[in-house]
Image (tube, rainbow, N blue to C red):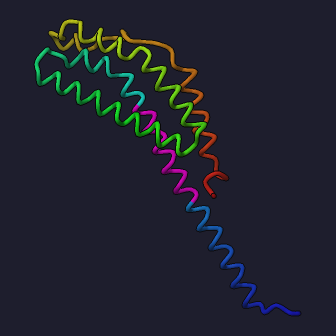
Amino acid sequence: MRIDPTVSVAAIAAATALIGYLLNNAATRRAERARRYAEALEMVERYRQLPYTFLRLHNETPETRAELAELLGETQKSLSFYRRWLTLESTEIGAAYDNLVDKVRERNSEFRRDALSRPTPAADVDIEAGYLYTFDDRAERLACINLMRKHLGLLRNLL
């Protein structure tokens, strides 16, 4: 049985279009996933920086207390969103992200209380607080990032 050359060309064109579509779609999904992973990590960093924000902004007025409470609440709400989303994305990544957030949370509350107990910055130079609130979360951060990288592999995004 002879195959018509027109059918062969059409089949090759269709296969090429399908492969191109799948690859393009996978690249788009990968880019979106990478963006969301970066946002999740950015939210951990915002949470990590809250003691410095509290130190710079507090002035014992009701308005400032409300602003700081709202900032803390929004940050915690965003962290909760990323915890759930990453767990839905991958239980492995979700667990690693939880470990990272929990590691930051271990000291964050203590650091925020300390920041609020310090005097309000009186001059511009006082805004530069230095590294008062440090702890080591490198292992948790690296574990989370490595799993995110693994999950961004091309073959995972084709499906």
Q: Residue at x 22, y 11 (%)?
A: 125
Residue 41's x, y, as percent? Answer: 46, 33
Residue 26's x, y, as percent? Answer: 58, 58
Report the number of discs: 0
Q: Is 109 within the magenta? A: no
Question: With 67 as the anchor, is 149 left or right in this view?
Answer: right
Residue 16's x, y, as percent? Answer: 67, 73
Q: In the image as oriented, which residue stretches furthest toward the top? A: 118
Q: Is 40 within the magenta? A: yes
Q: Is residue 64 above or below residue 32?
A: above
Question: With 71 as the anchor, is 12 left or right in this view?
Answer: right
Question: With 63 as the anchor, is 16 left or right in this view?
Answer: right
Question: With 8 as the anchor, is 146 left or right in this view?
Answer: left
Task: Give whichever of 104, 46 is nearer the camera.
Answer: 104
Q: Is residue 77 above or below residue 27?
A: above
What secondary structure do most residues of the magenta stretch adopt? helix
Q: Residue at x 15, y 22 (%)?
A: 64
Residue 123's x, y, as percent? Answer: 16, 11
Q: Quadrant of the C terminus?
A: bottom right
Residue 53 found in image quarter: top left
Q: Residue at x 71, y 82 (%)?
A: 11
Q: In the image as oriented, which residue stretches furthest toward the right? A: 1
Task: Give whichever of 30, 98 is nearer the camera.
Answer: 98
Residue interval drawn in magenta: 26-43
Q: Quadrant of the N terminus?
A: bottom right
Q: Residue at x 72, y 91 (%)?
A: 6
Residue 80 found in image quarter: top left
Q: Is residue 113 above or below residue 68?
A: above
